Image: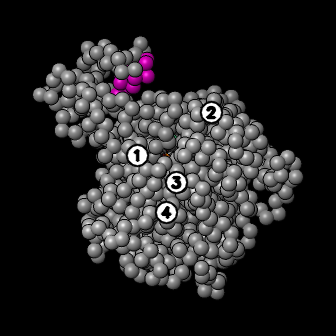
Amino acid sequence: MVLTSSKEDPSFPVPSRLLGADAEVKDDNPKGYPRPTPHITSTDEYLTLWKESITQPDVFWSRMAKDLLSWSKPFTQTLAGTLDEGNVRWFADGELNACYNCVDRHALEDPSRVALIYEPDEPNATQRITYGELLADVCRLANVLTIDYGLRRGDTVAIYLPMIPAAVIAMLACARIGCPHTVIFAGFSAGSVADRIHDARSRVLITSNEGRRAGKVIPLKAIADTALESCPTVEHVLVYERSPVPDPLPAGVMTAGRDEFWSTALPRHRPYCPPVPMSAEDPLFLLYTSGSTGLPKGVLHTTGGYLLGAASTVKYVFDVHPGDRFGCTADVGWITGHTYIVYGPLSLGIATTLLESVPTYPTPARYWQLVEEAKLTHFYTAPTAIRSLIRLGEHWPFNSDLSSLRVLGSVGEPINPEAWYWYNDKVGREQCAIVDTYWQTETGSIIISPLPGVTHTKPGSATLPLWGIDVAVLDPQTGAELQGRDVTGVLAIRQPWPSMARSVWKDHARYLSTYLKPYPSYYFTGDGVSRDRDGYYWIRGRVDDVINVSGHRLSTSEIEAALNQHDHVAESAAVGTSDPVTGQCIFAFVTLKDDDVTEQPMAIEVKDLALKVRTMIGPFATPKCILIVQELPKTRSGKIVRRVLRKIVDGEADSLGDLSTVANPEIVPELIKVVGVSD
Ligand code: WT7
């Protein structure tokens, strides 16, 4: 391990402590773990700061940005641009490097401090990686990318890796050299990988020979090879050896001149490479996410504002203090992994966890044994995971020592009261704060959430807005603001905040039309919301054609496009309906091409159709039910009326509403019957 000294790179200041080093440690915890005094101690303090952040965003955010981040060139501007014009920028004349902020400054303070707690799929094999070790590997990889592969600032790098330290190293190495990364979730199939690499025009792909999940092997390199057949932009593929590679290597596994192993490439280089000073508004990454129409879009986040959102929310929403150990069960392929596994915890210099496995492997105690073993202070997961564990019994969390935990987070969908209480009672043992955190890929970091120990919580409500978030509830039809309490409408935001997405990769028009044009002067979230009599927010779910399955965001059109790829499919319509474990699940209706409608084709067809979705998108997108029907409800102009299908699968066929726009209402009774039989 080789460490740098600040002399080697004078432009980057060494930080003072970031986390309120003088935090007083109270000894009121019966189990003996320190319980630091929270950063925010009262509702009044929260309200005063929130008001300042809305009325004087410049003052508020400039103080936060100086306090939490290290700048190689200080900014003199704060916010510029408006939501109306879609040209928002923060701290635009300042310069910083996200990797320096997440690694170097902590390695300089204490190289032996733990940065990553890696919990491999195989149990009882936890590994710890220090900030010093992380810096060395990030630098080696950065050198491979620039010196060997010729990457220049602004080139994009695709990362298709499982939940292993190499994924974090790869993201940070890209950030270090100014190359926006696009992480592709390792559950995606070749078609989705290809779409993303193609759209991002990546010159380099970083992947691994295999992935492991619950003992199963996922052939990532083989999937990547299939994807790369249609990705001519990729010049180099770096392959991390997640598992031993056969010796001799069978022919065709590595493409000569294009592919090389991680263990060959990294040792060629010195473990230091200077971080490139980036403008605060330079892209840090793009992350593809589903919208209501078309192909997934590359949501673009920039360096300064995004990192500030990540750091400030980890500090205040989770009330993180020096020495804490953060455990977030998301995958780095999603925004939660970007912000709350990588950039947030590391920017504050605490330890973060990479969990490669699933909550039930080898037993449903996996999470809880990890909490005990790693003495996690924070645990952040999704309601769907909690619900799946509730079914398996409370003895699983009961048998582990969970007393190190202070804050439990929930994300991805509204948390139902049953899951909330189980989390609070069985995991938190009534000793932890629960934070139900609402946000999106596009918001970059949490925007509505309680503050631990400060906000009085109501199970199912994400409660109150965070700093800088100026929430408006709009009438969905007129766009008028619904004033006062006890109102329901769509959730919009009135003012720019630092970590908001700045654009859609190479399609700014789509950014404007999706987020900023639907309700001029507001950012539109796509979610329905109620504000109750106490001013608390309750998220009511998507108002567009986005389906949320186990926290995975999918659009009806993506699923339909996959189904329509089947030779026998004429048309399809996918809708979301509620599911007791996954939150929502997918219900698909399919019509077959005329000559295919024989007496009994159903059983075989349905399996093939499901397979189509699995191979085109990924196993997580597989519809729970696919029904072959004679006809779909349509308007006179031929548009499928999904609203009617949604009502039928929700069991609300008695309140279908106005059918006057449906050109073929006679098919509705048939659809009700078919859905009824499938239950
Ligand atoms: C959508 C964003 C960034 C979080 C992970 C998913 C839903 C997210 C909550 C919550 C109710 C929530 C919304 C949002 N959502 N958190 N605490 N309560 N709904 O990110 O894939 O961009 O999905 O997830 O519908 O719009 P994403």
Residue at the image position 72 percent from the left and 65 percent from the top:
18
Tag 3: amino acid: Asp
The numbered mark at residue 290 is 1
Magenta stretch, main secondary structure class: helix
Mark 1 to mark 4 CA distance (whole Å): 22 Å
565 vs 511, left or right, is: left
Q: Which one is closest to the eye, mark 2 or mark 4?
A: 2
Q: Counting residues from the N terminus, which is met first, the one under dot 4 or under dot 3?
A: 3
Nearer to us in this view, 622 or 334: 622
Where disc 2 sits, the SS reads loop
In the figure, 459 relative to 150: above or below? above
How far across and how far down the image is residue 519, in percent? 47, 41
- Circle 3 sits in a helix, a strand or a loop, which is it? loop
Real-space CA distance between mark 4 and mark 3, rounded to the nearest whole angstrom: 15 Å
Alpha-carbon neighbours of circle 4 within 10 Å: few (<14), some, or many (≥20)? many
Q: Nearer the viewer, mark 1 or mark 3?
A: 3
Give the alpha-carbon distance from disc 3 to disc 2, as whole Å. 22 Å
